[in-house]
Image (cartoon, rainbow, N blue to C red):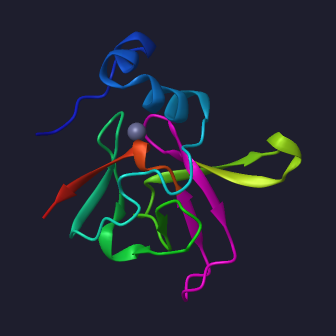
Amino acid sequence: MKKEMPKNEDEIKDILTPEEYHVLREKGTEVPFSGKLLHETRYGQYLCKVCGNPLFESDTKFDSGTGWPSFDEAIPGAVRELVDDSLGMHRMEVVCAKCGSHLGHIFRDGPTKTGKRYCLNSVCLDLEEK
Ligand SMILES: [Zn+2]
């Protein structure tokens, strides 16, 4: 079933748990090694938990050892990168291109040929199996 884009912040609050809301809408970070998608290996597409936008294909997922689900490429146009200078660090935040929800960060130290390491929060994603 296709997810409908929530109309406003109250609707988003209704569909998310408090932890999901904190990470997705208040740029929180889930505790490392706690996320349910960390060891997920099923085949499919990872969708934005808020709006259902397809973000990552399962074959771009890899084990980075960081404790968060990691990907080496996003679906073209699915995410946007924003400068994040919080916590005294210069990082690039990754958000859903459709609804602007926070997903995680991207680093350019990836071990695969793309050189990208999308470090994401499990709570931001839904796996749609294929
Ligand atoms: Zn979204």
Q: Residue at x 52, y 59 (%)?
A: 68
How far across and down, in percent of the image, does residue 29 sit?
59, 42
| Residue 47 belongs to magenta span | no
Q: Residue at x 33, y 35 (%)?
A: 51
| Residue 115 belongs to magenta span | yes
Please, which residue is most extreme toward the top here?
10
Above or below: residue 64 compared with residue 93 = below
How far across and down, in percent of the image, does residue 4 sit?
23, 29
Give the left or right position of residue 110, taking residue 10 as reference: right
Above or below: residue 45 compared with residue 126 = below
Nearest to the observer: residue 4 or residue 104:
104
Above or below: residue 58 compared with residue 91 = below
Q: How many marks?
A: 0
Nearest to the observer: residue 34 or residue 84:
34
Please, which residue is most extreme toward the right here?
88
Q: Residue at x 75, y 48 (%)?
A: 83
Q: Which residues are magenta?
A: 95-119
The image quadrant where one finds the C terminus is bottom left
Q: Quadrant of ligand 1?
A: top left
Above or below: residue 125 compared with residue 22 = below
Q: Residue at x 49, y 49 (%)?
A: 121
How far across and down, in percent of the image, does residue 9 sit?
45, 15
How far across and down, in percent of the image, does residue 44 sit?
22, 65
The image quadrant where one finds the N terminus is top left
Please, which residue is most extreme toward the bottom here?
113
Give the left or right position of residue 96, taking residue 28 as reference: left
